[in-house]
Image (tube, coloured by chain):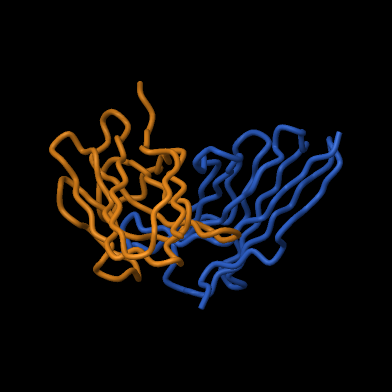
């Protein structure tokens, strides 16, 4: 049973437009969420995180929104750049999980020039 | 500052064999987590080591075991390899241990193929 879901395996966006990547979770104990980006032949790289006490966190072109009642979070990238093309993983954890993060299956983003 | 390194990069084994994967954590980090990433899936938590002790374990059988050394580097051992063990094995280091949400820094992974 997948606790963290990313229902879109892939997404294509034109350069300069907004990319929206979605993530849903089932475990109501999760209270910390992260997004990681992964290029081929490299390990995942931390992008942005959000605690359950917030509903939005922004870092430059990247914004994460959290809707706790819907158990849904999204990552917005504005404006999208070709270098953003990668696989994006949503991950979640709960206080009693320590640093054990549960990852979603990933969404492959392609930003077209 | 040296990042997280893993060795070897690629490995091919046959069913029933044993394998050891190695990870050097980033300088200043005392916590190492291991993940298995099967093709088309996200990383799955195997276990975590904090100050040389296992500090949490995912849903993996006992034939997956590990060690952390005084310099905080770590090994992942898998006995009696099965075909389904074929995956990318990722190591991530961080500071703080349990009950903290410090950023995890991942290595490039070891690609294990079991024939």
Task: Give the answer, above or below, for where A47 lies relative to A29.
Answer: above
Quadrant placement of the N terminus of chain B:
top left
User: Closest to the observer: A55 or A81?
Assistant: A81
Q: Residue at x 70, y 54 (%)?
A: A21
Q: Residue furthest bottom?
A: A1
Residue at image point 28% right, 28% down: B27
Residue B51, by quadrant, is: top left
Q: Is residue B23 left or right of residue A25?
A: left
Where residue A91 sits: x, y (%)?
50, 57
Front position in the image: A98 or A89: A89
| Chain displayed in orange | B
User: In this rendering, is residue A63 above or below A30?
Assistant: above
Which of these two is toward me, A113 or A78? A113
Q: Position of residue B11 (x, y in %)?
A: 42, 46
Task: Identify the residue shown where x is 29% and y is 35%.
Answer: B24
Q: Nearer the viewer, residue B46 or A90?
A: B46
Q: Relative to residue A87, is residue B10 drawn left or right?
A: left
Chain the render paints blue: A
Rendered location of residue B90, percent (x, y): 42, 48
Q: Position of residue B40 (x, y in %)?
A: 60, 59
Q: How many marks?
A: 0
Query: What residue do we see at 68% from left, 60% from top?
Result: A22
């Amino acid at each position: 049973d997948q606790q963290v879901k990313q229902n879109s395996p892939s997404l294509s966006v034109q350069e300069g437009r907004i990319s929206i990547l979605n993530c849903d979770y089932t475990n109501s104990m999760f209270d910390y969420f992260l997004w990681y980006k992964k290029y081929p032949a490299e390990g995942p790289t931390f992008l942005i995180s959000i605690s359950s006490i917030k509903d939005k966190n922004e870092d430059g072109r990247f914004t994460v929104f959290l809707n706790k009642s819907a158990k849904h979070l999204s990552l917005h990238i504005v404006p999208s750049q070709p270098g953003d093309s990668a696989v994006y993983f949503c991950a979640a954890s709960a206080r009693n999980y320590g640093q054990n993060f549960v990852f979603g299956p990933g969404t492959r983003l392609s930003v077209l020039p | 500052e040296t990042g997280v390194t893993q060795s070897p990069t690629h490995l091919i084994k046959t069913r029933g064999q044993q394998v050891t994967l190695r990870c050097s954590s980033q300088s200043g980090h005392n916590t190492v987590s291991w993940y298995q990433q099967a093709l088309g899936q996200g990383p799955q938590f195997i276990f975590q080591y904090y100050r040389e002790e296992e500090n949490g374990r995912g849903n993996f059988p006992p034939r997956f075991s590990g060690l952390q050394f005084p310099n905080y580097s770590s090994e992942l051992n898998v006995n009696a390899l099965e075909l389904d063990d074929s995956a990318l094995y990722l190591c991530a280091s961080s500071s703080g241990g349990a009950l903290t949400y410090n950023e995890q820094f991942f290595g490039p992974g070891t690609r294990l193929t079991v024939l």
